[in-house]
Amino acid sequence: MSLIVQKFGGSSVATIERIKEVAKRIVKTKDRWQKVVVVVSAMGKTTNELIELA
């Protein structure tokens, strides 16, 4: 049984329209494969803000 890993970030999640397209791709992948892992980059300056809070 294969494991599919999909990573999305940057311009692929920059707008709501692109996020919806990513969601469609994830659903299509899930329909074809049993095991799917999705990794999504933090939006904007979220990573920097989390580092500052640490």
Image (cartoon, rainbow, N blue to C red):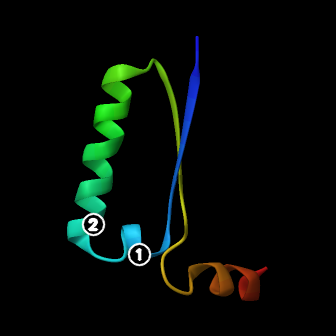
Left-right relation of 50 to 22: right
Depth order, front residue of 6/53:
6
Residue 52 x, y percent position in the rendering: 74, 89
Q: Residue at x 38, y 69 (%)?
A: 13
| Residue sitting farthest toward the top | 1
Disc 1 vs disc 2: Cβ atoms closer than 8 Å?
yes
Mark 1 residue element: helix
Left-right relation of 16 to 42: left
Depth order, front residue of 50/31:
31
* Quadrant position of residue 27: top left
Q: Residue at x 35, y 21 (%)?
A: 32
**Residue highlighted by disc 2:** 18
Q: Residues within 10 Å of mark 2 (few under 14, many from 20)?
A: few
Q: Residue at x 37, y 32 (%)?
A: 29
Q: Which amino acid type corresponds to the residue marked 2 in the rendered image?
A: Arg
Above or below residue 36? Residue 33 is above
Above or below residue 46? Residue 40 is above
Residue 34 x, y percent position in the rendering: 45, 17
Left-right relation of 41 to 48: left
Residue 10 x, y percent position in the rendering: 48, 74
**Residue highlighted by disc 1:** 11
How far apart are the two marked residues, 1 and 2, measured between alpha carbons?
Answer: 8 Å
